């Protein structure tokens, strides 16, 4: 699979600023710091597009279209439609959360959500981000295994809507949709014949 950390280590930065929630919990502030670096930008582009369509699959799927036309006109959220830019921003926010969890906190994240879209200008259904942490290196079930579910929110426009509060409110529904989301992940991994990873999801 194409997932590496080379893109994220230079541009996703801990600001060292800390905030407190109303109940006294500490919040870390991380910042996406884009720089004028074509090599890192290319790594980000490769990382982003592989969430929608693997580079190993695109030559078959695109038919007679160029890779750019296939991705921009069929796969990526449309940059000129009413909903597309906001959906694209939301997708990117979820992918950033995945990157942080995987490369900074050591979670395992099956990255299948974005490639399973039927309509490109819609958000995938189910929980936004699901991460797993396993106590045993060999993958055997342990009472210390952990499942984490995250609600991700981004703000593309200059709206004054409190997206953090939206995330808190929407997370209340996660206990309802988690079973459906886990089943979806397991099914998709099974379809890819990735039985070992499908069994990891079955653990939960």
Image: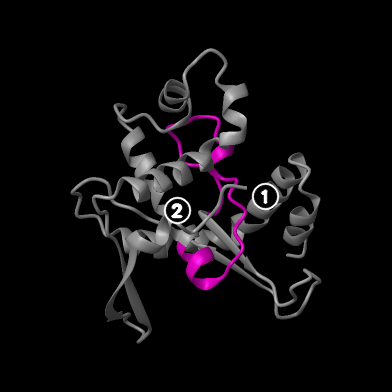
Q: Which type of secondary structure does the marked residue at label 2 adopt?
A: helix
Query: What residue do we see at 52% from left, 59% from top?
Result: 173
Q: Main secondary structure of the magenta part?
A: loop
Q: Nearer the viewer, residue 86 or 43?
A: 43
* Callout 2–callout 1 Cβ contact below 8 Å: no
Q: Which residue is mark 2?
A: 94
| 119 with respect to 187 (left or right) | left
What residue is disc 1 on?
185
Q: Position of residue 131 (x, y in %)?
A: 59, 63
Q: Quadrant of residue 202?
A: bottom right
Q: Mark 1 falls on what kind of element?
A: helix
Segment colored magenta: 100-127
Residue 116 part of the magenta-drawn span = yes
Residue sitting at 48 percent across and 62 percent down? 171
Q: Is residue 113 above or below residue 34?
A: above
Residue 164 lies within the magenta run: no
Quadrant of the image occupied by residue 45: top left
Which color mode does the image show? one colour
The quadrant where residue 42 appears: top left
Name the residue rendered at 69%, 72% in the picture.
Answer: 134
Q: Position of residue 145 (x, y in %)?
A: 70, 75
Classify 10 Å Cα crowding around label 2: few (below 14), some (14-19), many (20 and above): many
Disc 2/disc 1 C-alpha distance (Å)? 16 Å
Count of numbered labels shown in the rendering:
2
- Given residues 124 and 80, the one toward you in this image is 80
């Amino acid at each position: 699979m194409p997932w590496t950390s080379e893109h994220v280590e230079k541009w996703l930065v801990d600001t060292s600023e800390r905030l407190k929630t109303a109940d006294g919990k500490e919040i870390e502030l991380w910042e996406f710091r884009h720089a004028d670096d074509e090599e890192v930008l290319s790594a980000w582009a490769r990382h982003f597009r592989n969430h929608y369509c693997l580079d190993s699959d695109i030559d078959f799927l695109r038919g007679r279209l160029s890779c750019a036309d296939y991705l921009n006109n069929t796969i990526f959220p449309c940059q000129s439609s009413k909903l597309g830019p906001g959906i694209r921003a939301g997708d990117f926010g979820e992918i950033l959360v995945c990157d942080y969890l995987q490369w900074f906190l050591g979670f395992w994240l099956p990255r299948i959500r974005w490639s399973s879209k039927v309509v490109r200008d819609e958000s995938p259904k189910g929980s936004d981000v699901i991460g797993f942490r396993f106590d045993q290196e060999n993958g055997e079930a342990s009472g210390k295994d952990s499942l984490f579910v995250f609600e991700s929110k981004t703000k593309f426009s200059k709206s004054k809507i409190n997206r953090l509060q939206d995330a808190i409110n929407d997370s209340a529904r996660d206990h309802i949709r988690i079973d459906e989301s886990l089943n979806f992940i397991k099914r998709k991994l099974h379809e890819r014949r990735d039985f070992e990873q499908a069994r990891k999801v079955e653990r939960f």
